[in-house]
Image (cartoon, rainbow, N blue to C red):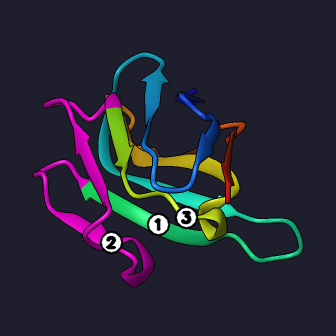
Amino acid sequence: QVHPVESGGGLVQAGGSLRLSCAASGSRFSITTVAWYRQAPGKQRELVASITSSGSTNYADFVKGRFTISGDNTKTSVWLQMNRLKPEDTAVYYCNTKGVYHPTTRLFDSWGQGTQVTVSP
C-alpha cells in the first residue's frame, strides 16, 4: 500500500512561512495526482492545492498567490510552500495521493495522518 506521510507543520506568526512535505512510500506504483487538503476545527475538509503527474497545478482561491505546490518527477515527494500565512490558515493539513499499482493496475487513493499548522495573530 502507498503511505503518504506529511511533515513540516508547526506554529508561526501571521505573515510568516511554512513548507509542508508529503512523502509517499510503497512499492511498484505510479502517482497520478497529489493534493493538499485542510480541515479546521468544526469545518469540513477542503482542497488547498493539487498537482498532477505532468506537473499541472490547481489552487483554491483562498491560497492563490500565497501557496505554491511542487513535486519531484515521480511526485513521491511533494511540497506545499505557504507564504504570508493568516490565522484563518490554521488547520490540520492532509496529503492525498492517487495513482495506480503495477502490474495489477489497481487504483489507490491514500491519505496521510495530517500535520498541524497554527498561525498566531
Q: Residues within 10 Å of mark 3 (few under 14, many from 20)?
A: some
- Magenta stretch in the rendered image: 52-77
Q: Amino acid at mark 1?
A: Val
Which mark is first along the chain, 3 or 1?
Answer: 1
In the displayed structure, would residue 37 be above or below residue 54?
below
Which mark is first along the chain, 2 or 1?
Answer: 1
CA gap between label 1 and label 2 equals: 6 Å
Q: Which dot, 1 or 3, sits closer to the camera?
A: 3
- Do the residues under discs 1 and 2 have CB atoms within 8 angstroms? yes
What percent of the width, then of the height, locates residue 14?
55, 55
In the displayed structure, would residue 75 be above or below residue 49?
above
What percent of the width, then of the height, locates residue 84?
40, 58
State the SS at label 2: strand
Which quarter of the picture shows residue 19?
Answer: top left
In the displayed structure, would residue 92 be above or below residue 61?
above
Q: Residue furthest bottom?
A: 61
What percent of the width, then of the height, locates residue 104?
39, 35
Q: Amino acid at mark 3?
A: Lys
Task: State the residue position of label 1.
Answer: 48
Tell me if residue 60 is in the magenta stretch: yes
Which quarter of the picture shows residue 113?
Answer: top right
- Do the residues under discs 1 and 3 have CB atoms within 8 angstroms? no
Left or right of 94? Residue 21 is left
Task: State the residue position of label 2.
Answer: 59
Task: State the residue position of label 3.
Answer: 86
| Residue 89 shows up from this direction | yes
